[in-house]
Amino acid sequence: MSAAEEMKNEQSRQFERGTANTVLHIDDVHKSFAGLHALSDVDLDVREGETHAIIGPNGAGKSTLLNVCVGRLKPDRGAVVFDGEVLTGKSPHEINQLGVARVFQTPEVFPELTVLENVMVPALSKRDGHFRLNPFKNFFREKAIREEAESVLENVGLQAQLSGLASTMSRGDKRRLELAMGLIQHPRLLLLDEPTAGMARHDTNATIDLLKKIKEGGMTKVIIEHDMHVVFSLADRISVLAGGRIIAQGTPEEIKVDPRVKEAYLGEEQV
Amino acid sequence: MEKNVALKDTTLFFGFAAVILLLPILLEPIGANYPDLLQKIAIFGIFAIGFNILFGLTGYLSFGHAAFIGIGSYMTLWSFKLLTMNVVPAIMFSVILAGVFAYIIGFVSLRRSGIYFSILTLAFAQMCYSLAYSVLTPITNGETGLQTRAIRKSSETSLLDGDIRIIDQAFGVQELGVPTTNFFGMAMSGYTGFYFCAVLLIVCFFIAQRITRSNFGIMLKAIKSNQNRLNYTGIHTRPYLITAFVISGMYAGLAGSLMAATDPIAGAERMQWTASGEVVLMTILGGVGTLVGPVLGAGIIKYAEQKVSSWNEGILESFFSFLPETLQHFMANLGVLFVGEGWHTTLGLLFMIIVIFLPGGIMEGIRRIGAKFSRKKPEADTNAAAPQPAE
Ligand SMILES: Nc1ncnc2c1ncn2[C@@H]1O[C@H](COP(=O)(O)OP(=O)(O)O)[C@@H](O)[C@H]1O
Ligand SMILES: [Mg+2]
């Protein structure tokens, strides 16, 4: 048995016993927009090292849940706890500094900066913290950080575009760039909002491979995904969100056969 | 790549320094090499470079930077009146005081972004302007303006009308009437004054260049590009913005101080919103976010201002004298709207033309022309190379 498989077995045993470390704990979160209940009574635990997929129909509240996690939205009720720290009420940069990175659904990059700079900025933030006054430290002399950025960009397949401006990239490439921006921070928790949406099959597969590779590195991930192929090839556990509520939770095998899930979500796709 | 950038920067810096130091010669053909104008170009160059650190790098458009010019000027005058006619302490105090004010104004204004930020800075500057004319007249001397005076004979005389110059007096400097401002004995007028300002301009350029290339600079650019994303990248943007605001406020304070050092009088009109608007024009005309652009914009506007506002109907009449008489009168009457007092009309027109046809300013125009030539070259090369195999 390979070391990786052994680790996976050990992990799943821990899951069964329920003793695995919870990295992210979402506790009874409630959020409504002018009467629309986007999230109701959401409880969710993400365990150390797992890839946790959140699936559900459009408008189910998946992105809203991530927004609550990273401090973009304040929940009406409930709290998000990361590694023992309450995130609710903290600002986005503080949450990121604690080790939570996010990849957005609509790619958010720095359009006027080069691809390389786009990735070096989050690396600097990781190294230097939320504010460091160094007006005379030459950015072009940050050799270590630049090399790291180059290697991360190579991993996501953008090595050919290092000096191009991010604004000139295709949507799919921007997604990969954002992924690189998340990865270079080596976050303890990476939140991915539909990282493959709008990608061609070929690119989707490349992204899956990449995410699998990171998984071996032990990074905890929450991934929102529409593509069932992606979900079932990556996720250790899945939570199903529908109408702002978690209607099912379990391993991919359990979710596949869950009647409620079929009804709410898989049904409409697989018919 | 890193070597390329370093080499380019060094070349740019030395090129810039050379051009500035040679300005008295370079500007001779267009009759712009008299000290008064040269000083103004250098001083407004400093103002615009500093303004560009805020506006060009972060995208935050301040409409109140003239306030720091005023603060620098008044502070400098008080240093002349109370301490010494040497400009060094005056400049140091002015830059520091402008920095303190910039911190306060920035702290409040940077709670907002976009147009609200601009309006807050404008409101602050207008407040300074009207305070200078009202409550603060004991410090600013109101509409008369603050001036250096001879040493007062008795302590009854108000400090506005008689100076004390403690340091100079302690060193036993003999004064006949009102002495000139100086840099350790060198009078701050004429070409000496220009070279003093020019050296400071070059230093300021160097600092701005370093900032632009620094980690701090890249964060400022990231703020301009996508501030929201930067927050989720773990960067607290507010202290970065406040620092940029303070730095650019200090540049403006230095510019204000130099205005007073080369011409020792300070009036509140330097803080009026038109003065704040002028630096915006300079920066945009030259090229926002470029290093050289703001200085170029400052130079062009100051030169054009002196020329155009000195023209009058008589000059126009003779200029159009080659036309039939009625047409000559018509053109002169039309032209007079744009010259002399009408200089601001010309400025407005120039500004509109730039914003509409060349939003990147003159530097963008230069870049485009450069790109055209470098694109033509390879084509010419291939054309030249093509027949060769046939031979
Ligand atoms: N900022 C907002 N203001 C108002 N309504 C919102 C906002 N964000 C999301 N919603 C609504 O909340 C619901 C859930 O949205 P979202 O979380 O984006 O769904 P999903 O990502 O699962 O497709 C949708 O009905 C959406 O219209
Ligand atoms: Mg969504």
Image (cartoon, grey):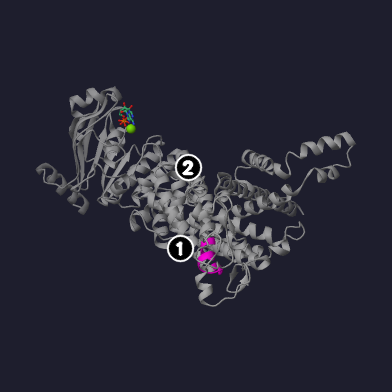
Residue B289, given in percent of the width and then of the height, sits at 54, 50
* Vertical placement of residue B333 versus B340, above or below: above
Residue B105, given in percent of the width and then of the height, sits at 43, 49
Residue at which label 2 appears: B123
Residue B36, given in percent of the width and then of the height, sits at 68, 60
Say which chain tag 1 marks.
A
Q: Are marks 2 and 1 on the same chain?
A: no
Image quarter for residue B341? Answer: top right
Q: Amino acid at mark 1?
A: Phe
Q: Residue at x 65, y 66 (%)?
A: B189
Image quarter for residue A254? Answer: top left
Say which chain tag 2 marks.
B
Q: Is residue A185 magenta?
A: no
Q: CA distance from mark 2 to mark 1?
A: 33 Å
Disc number lying in front (2 or 1): 2
On the picture, is B198 further left or further right than A157? right
On the picture, is B212 further left or further right than B284? left
**Secondary structure beneath disc 1?**
loop
Segment tinted magenta in the rendering: B77-87
What label does residue A136 carry, if any? 1
| Nearer to me, B87 or B80 | B80
**Residue A83 in view of the camera:** yes
**Residue A164 in view of the camera:** no
On the picture, is A61 further left or further right than B178? left
Q: Amino acid at mark 2?
A: Ala
Q: Residue at x 68, y 58 (%)?
A: B37
Q: Quadrant of ligand 1?
A: top left
